[in-house]
Image (cartoon, helix red, strand yellow):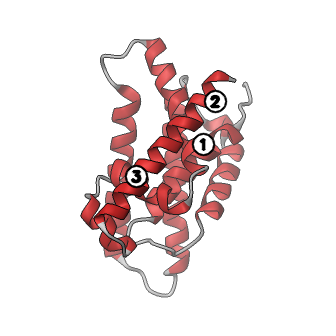
């Protein structure tokens, strides 16, 4: 079995974890970095169990470990009182997040080389998003990954629609700059 560098997926897992933790039902229940670290440890321990062949399958596998780790953390937080509604909400959130990821990774019209490029870009975008200021990153995740309208983001972030639009604009420009710089090196 070939060992692979799990640290390569840290940035993408951080974005996925932040996306989960931005949901109001989970917001600030635990730290995203702990969630990612625990996910990477579990993935390392279970590497021999991975049966996939492609980068996309590896990303989906890591996403599932992240989702299971989040479920475990939530159960720990609510150990004294089981909340079936919260568990169903988490399941729905994870399913929605998985469906978006799988659709983006699969893109049926893609050739194998295009799929590989898309998977590599996904990892690079994850790293770039993690280099943004927190408010820019949260606005981008909420709008582009969670599909929230600008007005809803403004309400949750306690700012104006114009301020959110500015965060999105500056954040996306910074992501482009980071990706452009990375592609030149």
Q: Which residue is mark 2?
A: 182
Residue 16: x %, y % from top left: 49, 51
Q: Are marks 1 and 2 in contact (CB under 8 Å)?
A: yes
Q: Is residue 170 above or below residue 9?
A: below
154 and 125: which is toward the camera: 154
Q: Is residue 6 above or below residue 153?
A: above
Left or right: residue 35 compared with residue 163: right
| Residue at image point 56% right, 33% down | 179
Q: Which residue has dot 3 on it?
A: 168
* Left or right of residue 150: residue 170: right
Q: Is residue 5 left or right of residue 121?
A: right
Residue at the spot 60% in from the left edge and 42% down from the top edge: 127
Give me the C-alpha separation between circle 3 and circle 2.
21 Å
The dot on residue 127 is 1
Against 42, residue 102 (above or below) is above
Q: Is residue 88 visible?
A: no
The x and y percentages for residue 183 are 61, 24
Q: Secondary structure at mark 1?
A: helix
Q: Which mark is residue 32?
A: none
User: Up-down: is 99 above or below 15?
Assistant: above
Quadrant of the drawing holding the N terminus: top right
Position in image of residue 169 (x %, y %): 40, 48
- Whole-number angstrom distance, CA of label 3 to CA of label 1: 17 Å
Question: In the picture, which quadrant includes the C terminus?
Answer: top right
Give the residue at x 37% y 79%: 83
- Crowding near pointer 3: few (<14 within 10 Å), some, many (20+)? many
């Amino acid at each position: 079995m070939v060992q692979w560098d799990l640290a390569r997926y840290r940035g993408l897992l951080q974005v996925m974890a932040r996306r989960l933790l931005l949901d109001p039902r989970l917001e600030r229940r635990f730290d995203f970095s702990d969630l990612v670290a625990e996910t990477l440890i579990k993935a390392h321990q279970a590497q021999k169990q991975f049966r996939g062949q492609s980068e996309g399958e590896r990303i989906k596998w890591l996403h599932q470990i992240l989702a299971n780790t989040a479920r475990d953390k939530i159960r720990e937080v609510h150990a004294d009182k089981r909340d079936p509604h919260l568990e169903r909400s988490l399941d729905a959130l994870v399913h929605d997040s998985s469906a978006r990821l799988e659709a983006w990774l699969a893109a049926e019209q893609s050739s194998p080389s295009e799929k590989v490029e898309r998977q590599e870009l996904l990892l690079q975008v994850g790293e770039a998003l993690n280099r943004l200021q927190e408010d820019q990153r949260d606005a981008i995740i909420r709008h582009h990954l969670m599909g929230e309208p600008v007005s809803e983001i403004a309400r949750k972030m306690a700012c104006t629609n114009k301020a959110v639009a500015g965060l999105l604009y500056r954040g996306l420009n910074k992501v482009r700059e980071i990706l452009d710089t990375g592609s030149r090196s």
